[in-house]
Image: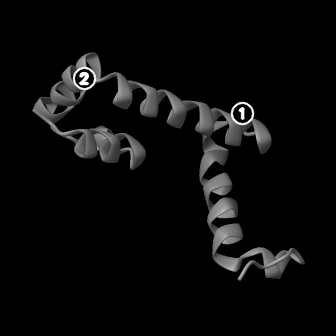
Amino acid sequence: MLSCKEVTTLHATEGLEHASWRTRMGARLHLLMCKHCRRYVRELARIGAAVRALYAVTDEARDEALLRRVLDSVRDGPSARGGRTWR
């Protein structure tokens, strides 16, 4: 059986898409029994939906552009956008 850490990592990194059948079934079984992991996965889905709504992404082809914008924003930091930097 998969551990909580393994299940949440698979969901957070979208590793289930490339996982074996056995791993996917193990993750589903774990989610049936673990309310904490179910809650975490549900929150990940809500965060993803909120980000898509924030950037008005409705087309899957634009998901990559959104990801690039978010990663650029994180990499450049707030000082590149004129925001406050925390120390």
Q: Is residue 3 left or right of residue 37?
A: left
Identified at 9% across, 32% down, the residue is 1
Q: Which mark is residue 28?
A: 2
Q: Is residue 21 left or right of residue 6?
A: left
Would you place residue 9 above or below residue 17 in this image? below
Identified at 78% across, 79% down, the residue is 85
Q: Circle 1 — which element?
A: loop
Identified at 62% across, 66% down, the residue is 71
At which x and y percent is residue 64? 59, 53
Name the one closer to the observer, 82 or 15.
82
Q: Which is nearer the N-term, disc 1 or disc 2?
A: 2
Identified at 73% across, 39% down, the residue is 57
Residue type beneath disc 2: Arg
Name the one closer to the observer, 86 or 43.
86
Q: Which mark is residue 39?
A: none
Quarter holding residue 38 = top left
Foreground label between 1 and 2? 2
Q: Residue furthest front?
A: 87
Name the one closer to the observer, 20 or 3.
3
Residue type beneath disc 1: Thr
At which x and y percent is residue 56? 79, 39
Q: Are marks 1 and 2 in contact (CB under 8 Å)?
A: no
Q: Circle 2 — which element?
A: helix
Q: Residue furthest top?
A: 32
At which x and y percent is residue 76? 70, 78
Q: Which mark is residue 58?
A: 1
